[in-house]
Amino acid sequence: MHAPTGTFPQRVAIAIHDQRLQAALNHASGGFVHKRAAQVAALPEFEALRERARAVKEHVLAHLDGYLERYEAEVIRQGGQVHWAADAEQAQQIILGICRQANAKTITKGKSMVSEEIGLNAVLEAEGYRVVETDLGEYIIQLAKEPPSHIIVPAVHKTKAQVGDLFDEHHRPLGYTRHLTEVGEMVNEAREVLREHYFKADVGITGGNFLIAETGSSIIVTNEGNGDLTQTLARVHIVTSGIERVVPTLDDALTFLRLLARSATGQETETYTTVSTGPRRTDDLDGPQEYHVVLVDNGRSKMLGGPFREMLRCIRCGACLNHCPVYTSIGGHAYGWVYPGPMGSVLTPLINGIDQAYDLPNACTLNGRCQSVCPVKIPLPGLLREIRRQQFSTGLTPGVTRLALQVWAWVAQRAPIYHALMRLGIPLLHRLGRRRGHLSWLPMAAGWTDTRDLPAPQGGTFQQAWKARQGAQR
């Protein structure tokens, strides 16, 4: 799999001028937004559900150790095994050990962001295992040797024509000779190709949308049914999940399920919601012989005890991506890692280090749209500001930027000076942009105006306009 290369500004420049990418993003983004809005409007209790989900998550995070211990005990009681991984490397080694013990050759995978986070596929393939992604979007990007660009729709950056070309290249040696142009045909062909792998698989790996403490169950949601086949047909089922995905009861999980599909894809519910509890029983018709859960920390405990605890409420719905003007302009690969968009701009620095992802929190416009649509009410703009503050206080912010911010702070805290400068600057900007109504170039702001226009001020400051209005009303 080829990870994005170059710096963040370089990746952004490439993305903005990639016409195919822009076409794919434009096609997808509006649909998600409108479908979500329709579902929210049709559910009067949506805001009440958001508040309840937030409260449940906060309760769990306050008692996370207890709920994880209860979950582990229930998994064991049901015949499964729980493995604890402090970081990505330990998680990789645990899963490798399970696969070796199973004498596995073929491994099927349902969509799992945690497996992407720990770089699992590359490790398994390096050991000689045949790894097959069964989610259609993940399968497409596996063929393309690319990472996902969206946490819900991994191949959202691909056009229909690009997918057709990929299928030509990889399916023709399997006997599929017709060039496909319709989505339905592509889905059917992928289904036929993947079918044999389900029956060959020794190990099936899935994620876990929710882990139920009271029953030791894991829940996955899919639209294709691939997750069901992955976890029931293989001899060994491995669930990979972050430690924060546990919820107290099945009733609590239902609250999140009512929010998840509506927020993610604008559906009332996903096509398949599957609850798995341990390995196959004696009288079961199908199911795995072994059931393993790998609980991954990878920086989450550190988040739990600090100012970013609220980020652990995230249910990975992708709503913040779909509504983010930055993400919908540059796509996911520009972010450089597994988690893109607003949630990724928080998670990536926290997991990989704020010095390793400096640009991500600083790319946000802080418009607040992500927070307004988050089903568990995560204050993403506030968390991004906190990362910026930490970058500034630890000296990571470039010298020129630090100086500019210090000057701005000094001016902003002195109202007479601030208002005087605004009375000089705003009329000047108004005159510069009055012919077209906008500014396409600003000194020391070429990075902003290179790809967008800045609306020109109307000619006076807000205070001046307010005073004029008040005078007119007297």
Image (tube, grey):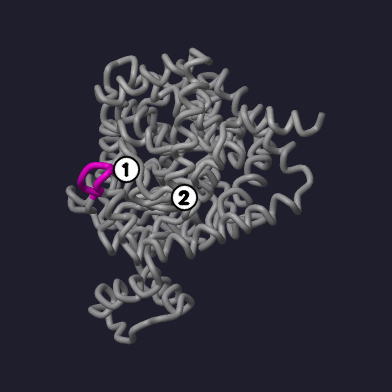
Q: Nearer the viewer, residue 234 or 401?
A: 401
Q: Which residue is mark 2?
A: 438
**SS of the residue under disc 1:** helix
Q: Is residue 142 left or right of residue 73?
A: left
With respect to residue 101, does 234 lie above or below? below
For label 1, the residue is 447
Magenta segment includes 419 = no
Counting from the top left corner in percent of width and height, residue 418 is at: 49, 20
Q: Amino acid at mark 2?
A: His
Nearer to us of marks 2 and 1 is 2
- Image coordinates of residue 240 in percent, x first then y, are 41, 40
* Mark 2 surroundings: few (<14), some (14-19) or many (≥20) residues within 10 A: some
Q: Quadrant of residue 39?
A: bottom right
- In the visual, does 197 lie left or right of 153? left
Number of numbered discs on residues: 2
Boundaries of the magenta span: 3-10
**Which of the marked residues, 2 or 1, is nearer the chain's N terminus?**
2
- Residue at 40% from the left image edge and 33% from the top image edge: 347
Identify which amino acid the numbered label 1 is placed on.
Gly
State left or right for residue 376 relative to residue 399. Answer: right
Secondary structure mostly seen in magenta is: loop
Q: Residue at x 42, y 14 (%)?
A: 410
Q: Is residue 4 magenta?
A: yes
Do we see residue 94 in this rendering? Answer: yes
Check contact, mark 2 vs mark 1: CB within 8 A. Answer: no
Image quarter where the C terminus lies is top right
Depth order, front residue of 102/40: 40
**At which x and y percent is residue 212?**
58, 35
Considering every residue shown, the one lying at the far bottom of the view is 178
Q: In the image, what residue occupies the spot 51% across and 32% down?
A: 380
Tag 2's secondary structure?
strand
- Give the x, y percent position of residue 36: 63, 53
